[in-house]
Image: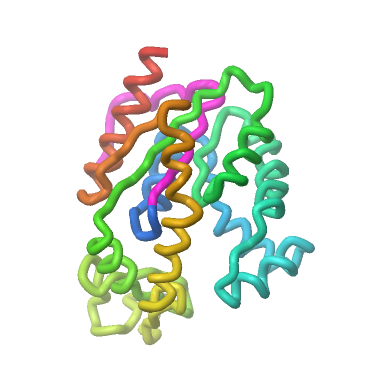
Amino acid sequence: MADARPLPEPALGTRVIFLGPPGAGKGTQAGRLAGHLRIPKVSTGDMLREAIAVGTPLGRVAGPLMEKGGLVPDDLLIDMMEERLDKPDAARGYILDGFPRTLRQAEGFEYIKRGDVTALVYVFNVEVPREELLKRLSGRRWCPHCQSTYHVQNNPPKDDSLCDKDRTLLIQREDDKETAVARRLAEYDERTAPLIDYYRGRSRFHTVDGYRPPDAVFAELKTIVATEKAAS
Ligand SMILES: [Zn+2]
């Protein structure tokens, strides 16, 4: 939807953290908000995949771990983020996607942005009922050739189980199969959900109803940022 109004000026040092379980739509919203505020989206998942593909020292440690469904150690992720957020394009702010995911990472993030009092840190906690998450995650399909993603209900391919672009047979990623989904949700409950209490009351914390169409969620995020900026 085109918007004829001028784009907002990004507030100096606007930083956004997304909390919420897998399947809540955080990555999508993070990307849209980054475009809206014209600041980079910093995704740990993308960075790790890239490090693995290029074969950096970090990638060589993370690759085998992730292949087995294991977790990348907090300290490695914190170091990776410190290096990334030090780059010039992050000076005006950034949207984090996939970080922090543990209390230790949250503490690491405090350390990374130490001394920076001009920063506005928004925390969006995206809530979606568990039943809906299961539906979203288990319905995901993926083209191994061009990496397009589909969903059996929300975004099905035109031709049953074939990619629209190259007619490759779509597959379900290991991560989206039932046992993996259960593991990811349990990990979220154990490791990430405590961050809700950590951030509530100590920052610009907002719980957002993610059980709505993506456009409605995005509209609310934009309103919150605009309202708070006006008030600050
Ligand atoms: Zn394809």
Q: Which residue is drawn at 42% across and 52% down?
A: 27
Image quadrant assignment for residue 22: bottom left
Q: Is residue 115 magenta?
A: no
Q: In this view, does 149 lie above or below 115?
A: below
Q: Residue at x 42, y 45 (%)?
A: 19
Q: In this view, does 71 lie above or below 174?
A: above
Q: Which residue is drawn at 54% across and 40% down?
A: 40
Q: In which quarter of the image is the C terminus?
A: top left
Residue nearer the viewer, 62 or 4: 62
Image position of 7 (left or right of 187): left
Image position of 182 (left or right of 214): right
x then y, percent, for residue 62: 68, 66
Q: In this view, does 221 lie above or below 57?
A: above
x then y, percent, for residue 88: 68, 34
x then y, percent, for residue 96: 52, 43
Image position of 203 (left or right of 118): left
Taking the view exactly as shown, the residue that stands out farthest to the top is 231
Q: Which residue is drawn at 39% across and 31% down?
A: 205
Image quadrant assignment for residue 215: top left
Taking the view exactly as shown, the residue that stands out farthest to the bottom is 169
Residue range of the region highlighted in magenta in the rendering: 1-20
Magenta stretch mostly in which secondary structure? loop
x then y, percent, for residue 189: 42, 56
Question: Is any part of residue 33 visible from this angle?
Answer: yes
Residue nearer the viewer, 167 or 149: 149
